[in-house]
Image (spheres, rainbow, N blue to C red):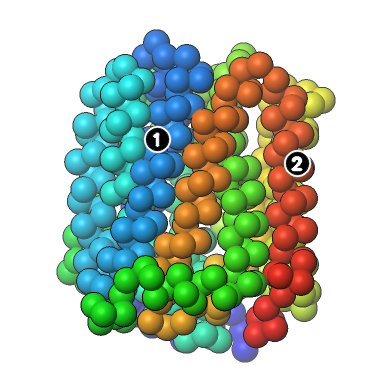
């Protein structure tokens, strides 16, 4: 079946979700430049790391809350509430200066802003048949990264030539638009009875699902690696004397490459074992930071981003479908939420520990990133990571 035929089989509500997701992700202006916003307000890199870690701790709470709400209240209502509350938090965050106030607001923002993710992923699983989920998640990533290829570049220009406040304002407006579309135009998706919607039921299932727990461990490692692109990467860029607007362009390269090459790459790698593709991607993501051991020139940042993106495309184009096939139908929101715990924990540790480490031993940080990529590959290739139902 041709690619165009597969795309035509995807249901209309899925395309509505894709359009809304593009608008929302285009407006993710704050997170890539949050470290710079905090340090430019007179705080140290370590203090910025603590504040960003607070955002990740908040997203940990979001995984618990969002997973439960997605299964209990419905997917669209959860996404809308998350978006509206996130808009308010972004505007409040723009007015903070001291890192302690920023940390408190970052925690609240992370808690509400990220609560919609489990609902979004679970809705795709609800409305798209299993045989079409890989292409559906690839299309979703295309929309996200097309927005990412445009958003950071625009945000970089605003940060360099206008005011950081506009980053927060645009972020808030796009969140409101997303919330309205989710509330009015998207289906509720599958809902679970109150007696079965608690986390205790999901935990009984999850702790017996060894392949899913192996994926959880791999995501812990890759979350650390991924967070470095939003924390130490722009700081390293600035400290090497490079203009901030070019940082936006290099970050946008990630989205451009994904939009152009992820779907063809996924098709090319289709005959490969799924766990082998995931392992290769994890290794490339971690090893990409080793480029900085040799140079701090602009070309080094471009090369690092190219290697990182090839790894991301190899791993993430299959990871969501791989995880989705392991989730029981009545626990999809909580399974997605539980996997989000891994990203929250890894991101929190990466922010709180990675940035202070960068201040004193940046080369050691790059080596740790590479080692974590290898560890993620080992976990997914181990017997514990074997899932016979996934092809």
First in residue order: circle 2 vs circle 1? 1
Above or below residue 79? Residue 297 is above
Residue 170 in view here: no
Task: Give the camera-side residue of 123 and 185.
Answer: 123
Q: Position of residue 369 (x, y in %)?
A: 70, 39
> Residue 65 location in percent, x, y?
31, 58
At 27% from the left edge and 37% from the top edge, which residue is drawn? 90
At x 45%, y 27%, the residue is 50
In the image, is residue 354 above or below residue 173? above
x and y percentages locating residue 301 in the rendered image: 68, 31
In the image as oriented, which residue stretches furthest toward the right?
294
Left/right of residue 286 with respect to residue 44 in the rendered view = right
- Tag 2 near tag 1, CB within 8 Å: no
Residue wearing tag 2: 370
The residue sitting at the bottom extreme is 1
Query: Who's the residue at 63% across and 43% down the image?
Result: 225
**In which quarter of the view is residue 20 placed?**
bottom left
Q: Secondary structure at mark 1?
A: helix
The front one of 279 and 387 is 387
User: Circle 1 sits on which residue?
Assistant: 54
Task: State the image coordinates of residue 115 (x, y, percent, origin top left).
Answer: 33, 55
Q: Nearer the viewer, residue 316 or 196?
A: 196
Query: Is disc 2 placed on a helix, strand or loop?
Result: helix
The residue at 70%/69% (across/down) is 385
Residue 216 lies left or right of residue 164; in this view the side is: right
The quadrant of the rendering that contains the C terminus is bottom right
Residue 48: quarter of image: top left
Q: Can see residue 2? A: yes
């Amino acid at each position: 079946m041709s690619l165009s035929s597969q795309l035509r089989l995807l249901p209309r509500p899925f395309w509505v979700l894709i359009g809304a997701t593009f608008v929302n992700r285009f407006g993710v202006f704050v997170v890539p430049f949050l470290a710079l916003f905090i340090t430019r307000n007179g705080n140290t890199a370590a203090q910025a790391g603590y504040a960003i870690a607070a955002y990740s701790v908040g997203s940990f709470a979001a995984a618990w809350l969002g997973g439960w709400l997605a299964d209990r209240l419905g997917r669209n209502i959860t996404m809308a509430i998350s978006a509206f509350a996130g808009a308010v938090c972004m505007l409040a965050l723009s007015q903070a200066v001291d890192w302690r106030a920023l940390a408190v607001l970052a925690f609240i923002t992370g808690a509400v802003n990220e609560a919609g993710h489990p609902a979004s992923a679970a809705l795709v699983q609800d409305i798209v048949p299993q045989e079409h989920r890989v292409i559906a998640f690839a299309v979703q990533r295309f929309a996200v990264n097309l927005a990412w290829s445009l958003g950071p570049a625009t945000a970089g220009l605003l940060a360099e030539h206008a005011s950081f406040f506009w980053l927060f304002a645009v972020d808030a407006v796009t969140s409101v638009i997303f919330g309205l579309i989710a509330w009015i135009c998207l289906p509720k998706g599958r809902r679970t009875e109150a007696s079965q919607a608690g986390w205790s039921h999901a935990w009984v299932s999850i702790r017996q699902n060894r392949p899913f727990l192996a994926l959880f461990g791999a995501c812990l490692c890759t979350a650390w690696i991924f967070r470095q692109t939003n924390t130490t990467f722009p700081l390293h860029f600035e400290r090497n004397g490079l203009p901030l607007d070019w940082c936006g362009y290099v970050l946008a390269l990630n989205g451009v490459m994904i939009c152009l090459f992820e779907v063809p790459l996924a098709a090319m790698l289709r005959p490969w074992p799924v766990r082998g593709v995931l392992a290769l991607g994890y290794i490339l993501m971690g090893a990409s930071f080793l480029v900085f051991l040799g140079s701090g020139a602009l070309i080094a940042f471009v090369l690092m981003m190219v290697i990182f993106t090839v790894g991301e495309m190899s791993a993430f184009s299959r990871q969501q479908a791989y995880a989705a096939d392991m989730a029981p139908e009545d626990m999809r929101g909580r399974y997605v939420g539980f996997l989000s715990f891994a990203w929250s924990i890894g991101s929190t540790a990466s922010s709180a520990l990675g940035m202070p480490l960068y201040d004193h031993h940046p080369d050691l940080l790059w080596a740790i990133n590479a080692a974590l990529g290898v560890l993620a590959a080992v976990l997914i290739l181990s017997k514990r990571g074997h899932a016979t139902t996934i092809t």
